[in-house]
């Protein structure tokens, strides 16, 4: 029983609709502007990654980091440092300061509540 997405021709917003049978389904009105000019679109989707793909993309976590290492915002700094090194570009001083502060437990405001 899939959920379908519809884009409104009037305002461009996306509306989701659950249909048991697509053959009997009626196009929903736009949730944003209530226009009846919606068109079904191809929904985005995600694919799971293997552990090897995660390590290739984000690097190997530090020893003792545990199974949730990639959820830890401190690991972002390590990943960023590696990417700057790979590109041969020097990391901005402000970024270095933020990474060092995160390693000491002082996380930037956007990630404190994660």
Image: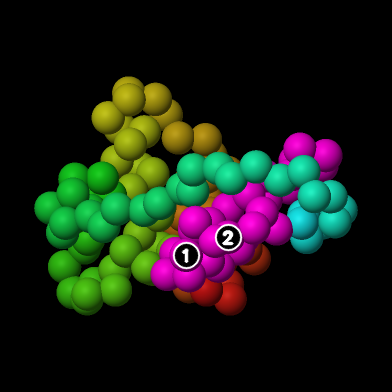
Q: Nearer the viewer, residue 82 or 70?
A: 70
Scheme of colours in the image: rainbow
The picture places residue 72, in percent across and down from the top left corner, at 38, 68
Which quadrant of the rendered structure holds the N terminus? bottom left
Q: Is residue 10 magenta?
A: yes
| Residue 41 found in image quarter | top right
Asked whether the viewer can see residue 101, the reply is no
Q: Nearer the viewer, residue 107 or 68?
A: 68
Task: Answer with left or right where residue 98 lies relative to residue 7.
Answer: left
- How crowded pointer 2 is (Cα within 10 Å; few <14, some 14-19, many 20+) is rated as few
Name which residue lies at 49% across and 56% down. Answer: 23
Task: Answer with left or right where residue 49 lies relative to residue 87.
Answer: left
* Vertical position of residue 70 compared to residue 112: above or below: above
Name which residue lies at 33% across and 36% down. Answer: 83
Task: Answer with left or right where residue 17 lies relative to residue 35.
Answer: left
Tell me whether the residue at label 2 lies in contact with that at label 1, contact meaning CB atoms closer than 8 angstroms. yes
Please give the residue where the numbered disc 1 appears in the rendered image: 21
Name which residue lies at 13% across and 53% down. Answer: 52
Name which residue lies at 86% across and 53% down. Answer: 33
Q: Secondary structure at mark 2?
A: loop
Task: Answer with left or right where residue 11 lies relative to residue 102.
Answer: right
The magenta region covers 1-28
**Residues under labels 2 and 1: Cα distance?**
6 Å
The picture places residue 50, in percent across and down from the top left corner, at 16, 56
Q: Nearer the viewer, residue 70 or 12?
A: 12
- How crowded pointer 1 is (Cα within 10 Å; few <14, some 14-19, many 20+) is rated as few
Please give the residue where the numbered disc 2 appears in the rendered image: 25
Q: Is residue 26 magenta?
A: yes
């Amino acid at each position: 029983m899939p959920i379908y997405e519809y884009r409104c021709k009037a305002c461009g917003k996306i509306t989701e609709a659950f249909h048991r049978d697509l053959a009997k389904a009626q196009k929903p009105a736009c949730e944003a502007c209530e226009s009846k000019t919606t068109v079904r679109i191809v929904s985005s989707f995600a694919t799971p990654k293997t552990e090897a793909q995660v390590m290739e993309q984000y690097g190997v976590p530090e020893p003792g980091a545990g199974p949730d290492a990639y959820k830890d915002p401190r690991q972002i700094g390590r990943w960023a440092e590696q990417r700057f090194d790979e590109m041969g570009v020097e990391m901005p001083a402000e970024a270095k300061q933020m990474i060092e502060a995160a390693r000491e437990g002082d996380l930037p405001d956007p990630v404190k509540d994660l």
